[in-house]
Image (spheres, rainbow, N blue to C red):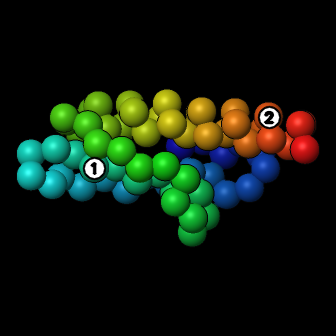
Amino acid sequence: MDDDGFGSPYRLAVCEERGAWSWTLLRGEAVAMTGQAPGLEEAVRHAAFAAGAHAAFERIGRKRF
């Protein structure tokens, strides 16, 4: 995942559990978001979308507060 210039880049951890793929989006050592998807490609796509949304909400938070 790309670095947004304001901190650590996102990292993605993916594992298969009981026929579904679980993904965890990490920023530094903190968990940013988690989720599940039916396949590996979908898990990567969902995590990429989540990274964009997480970065956008962080930018909004910095501007508003």
Query: Looking at the figure, which quarter contains the C terminus?
Result: top right
24 left or right of 51 in image: left
Distance between the alpha carbons at the discs numbered 1 and 2: 28 Å
Residue flagged by tag 2: what amino acid is it?
Ile
Count numbered badges in the picture.
2
Q: How dense is the environment of label 1, judged by Cα within 10 Å: few (below 14), some, or many (20 and up)?
A: many
Q: Which residue is mark 1?
A: 22
**Circles 1 and 2 in contact, beta carbons < 8 Å:** no
| Image point (89%, 37%), residue name | 64
In the current view of this chain or complex, which residue is farthest to the left?
Answer: 18
Pinpoint residue 32: horizontal percent, then vertical percent: 55, 53
Q: Which element type, helix, strand or loop, lies under badge 1?
A: strand
Q: Residue at x 57, y 69 (%)?
A: 29
Side (left or right) of 8 relative to 42: right
* SS class, disc 2: helix
Q: Position of residue 30 (x, y in %)?
A: 57, 64
**Residue 21: x %, y % from top left:** 22, 46
Q: Residue furthest bottom?
A: 29
Lower sequence index among marks 1 and 2:
1
Q: Amino acid at mark 1?
A: Ser
What is the quadrant of residue 47 in the picture? Answer: top left
Q: Which residue is mark 2?
A: 60
Q: From the top left corner, tell me how far across and down residue 2 is, in percent.
A: 60, 41
Q: Quadrant of residue 44?
A: top left
Residue at screen point 51% across, 36% down: 50
Q: Who's the residue at 79% across and 34% down the image?
A: 60
Name the one closer to the observer, 2 or 35: 35
